[in-house]
Image (cartoon, rainbow, N blue to C red):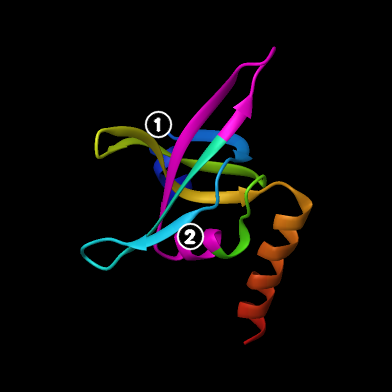
Amino acid sequence: MLYERLLEGENIIRFIGDLVNTPTLYKSKNGKDICRFTLQRIRAGNSFVRVPCVLYSEEARLFKRIADKGARIEICGELGAIAGELVIVGGMFNALDERTKRAHRAIIEAAYNK
């Protein structure tokens, strides 16, 4: 769905960074799972950029299960505002460090083998 929107000309953000905090999973008022976390990218010198991110539903549950503080993550989504805070509202994520990739792959294989 995210790629279809990209092909339709919508603006999609892609950000790669390290997970600053342990992801927080909670339910919205309407019962939807929401996972909030922050990614950080170190820039030249000693400066850095921190970007708050949000995932919903199945992606949120999966992310909470596999991602630990310090993991290298790529998130693709759109820029949005939640409670006055500018965030990347993700449609999907990719694990880029080996440990998180293995955990992600194991969950997908277990679901496939059911």
Tell me where residue 67 appears, x and y as whole percent: 61, 56
In the picture, measured across the screen, residue 13 lies left or right of residue 44, that is: left
Tell me where residue 96 appears, x and y as whole percent: 70, 46
* Circle 1 crowding by C-alpha within 10 Å: few under 14, some 14–19, many from 20: few
Q: Regarding mark 1 in the picture, which secondary structure is present there?
A: loop
Q: Quadrant of residue 41?
A: top right
Q: Closer to the N terminus: mark 1 or mark 2?
A: 1
Q: Which residues are magenta?
A: 40-64
Q: Quadrant of residue 43?
A: top right
Residue drawn at (54%, 58%) of the image: 63
Q: In the rendered image, which residue does mark 1 sit on?
A: 11
Q: Nearer the viewer, residue 54 or 94?
A: 54
Count every numbered label the image shows and give the total.
2
Picture layout, residue 33 above or below residue 80: below
In the picture, measured across the screen, residue 30 lies left or right of residue 49, that is: left
Residue drawn at (46%, 59%) of the image: 60
Q: In the rendered image, which residue does mark 2 sit on?
A: 59
Tell me where residue 93 appears, x and y as whole percent: 55, 50
Amino acid carrying mark 1 in the image: Asn
Check residue 49 for magenta coloring: yes
Amino acid carrying mark 2 in the image: Glu
Q: Viewer-nearest of labels 1 and 2?
A: 2
Outermost residue toward the top in this view = 45
Tell me where residue 15 appears, x and y as whole percent: 55, 34
Residue drawn at (76%, 56%) of the image: 99
Picture layout, residue 26 above or below residue 80: below
How far is the residue under mark 1 from the one under mark 2? Answer: 20 Å
Check residue 57 for magenta coloring: yes
Q: Quadrant of residue 111?
A: bottom right
